[in-house]
Image: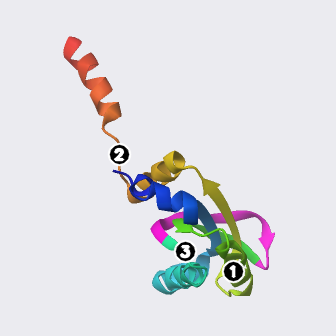
């Protein structure tokens, strides 16, 4: 059973499923990745979020300078949170010295589960099973 299906009734009544992308400074993350990750998790905890999966995603040059930063790292987080926590999350990100920008998207359970699997590195076995019969027939 997937994460979202495990508590589908309570999630729909009390919490939504979200994917957050937090832009942090590349040099800050390179110097101390644990402290940077802990700062993002602390922001989410203050907002009442339950983190399901997280990991750094992309590090590189930004399309344009943001608050003096020319390079940045995008940190992805999948979490569950009550809708009322969104104001707290936004405000905490604005006050943070770690987070340069943030983007939060609400997901349906199917997409949320796919994102969690992708962040955790889980591969579905449907693809290899479809290729196996073709290999035997040759």
Is residue 60 something that shows in the picture? Answer: yes
Q: Callout 2: helix, strand or loop?
A: loop
User: Taking the image as drawn, is residue 16 in sight?
Assistant: no
Residue 20 drawn at (x, y percent): 61, 65
Left or right of 126? Residue 10 is right
Mark 3 or 2, which is nearer the eye? 3
- Single out the residue that lies furthest toward the left: 136
Residue 79 versus residue 92 in the image, above or below: above
Q: CA distance from mark 1 to mark 3?
A: 10 Å
Q: Which residue is mark 2?
A: 123
Measure the C-alpha gap from mark 3 to mark 2: 26 Å
- Relative vertical location of residue 103 with respect to residue 46 in this rendering, above or below: above
Q: How many marks?
A: 3
Residue appearing at x 63%, y 70% in the figure: 22
Image quarter hosting the C terminus: top left
Decide which of tag 1 and tag 3 comes sooner along the chain: 3
Residue annotated with mark 3 = 49
- Reading the chain from its start, which is encountered first: label 2 or label 1? 1
Q: Residue at x 68, y 86 (%)?
A: 96
The x, y position of residue 16, in whole percent, is 58, 61
Name the dominant secondary structure of the magenta segment: strand
Tell me the magenta residue range.
Answer: 51-68
Position in image of residue 130 (x %, y %): 32, 25
Residue topped by disc 1:
88
The tag earlier along the polypeptide, 3 or 2, is 3
Q: Nearer the viewer, residue 42 or 67?
A: 42
Q: Give the foreground label among 2 and 1.
A: 1
Q: Which of the labelled discs sits on residue 6, or is there none?
A: none
Give the class, few, some or many, for how many residues have Cα within 10 Å of label 3's Cα (few <14, many ≥20). Answer: many
């Amino acid at each position: 059973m997937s994460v979202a299906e495990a508590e589908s009734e309570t999630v729909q009544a009390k919490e939504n499923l979200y994917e957050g992308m937090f832009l942090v400074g590349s040099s800050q993350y390179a110097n101390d990745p644990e402290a940077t990750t802990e700062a993002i998790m602390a922001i989410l905890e203050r907002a009442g979020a339950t983190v399901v999966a997280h990991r750094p995603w992309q590090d590189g040059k930004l399309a344009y300078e943001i608050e003096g930063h020319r390079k940045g790292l995008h940190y992805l987080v999948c979490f569950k949170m009550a809708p009322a926590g969104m104001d707290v999350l936004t405000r905490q990100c604005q006050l943070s010295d770690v987070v340069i920008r943030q983007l939060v998207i609400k997901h349906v359970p199917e997409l949320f589960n796919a994102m969690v699997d992708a962040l955790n590195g889980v591969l579905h076995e449907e693809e290899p099973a479809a290729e196996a019969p073709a290999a035997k027939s040759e």
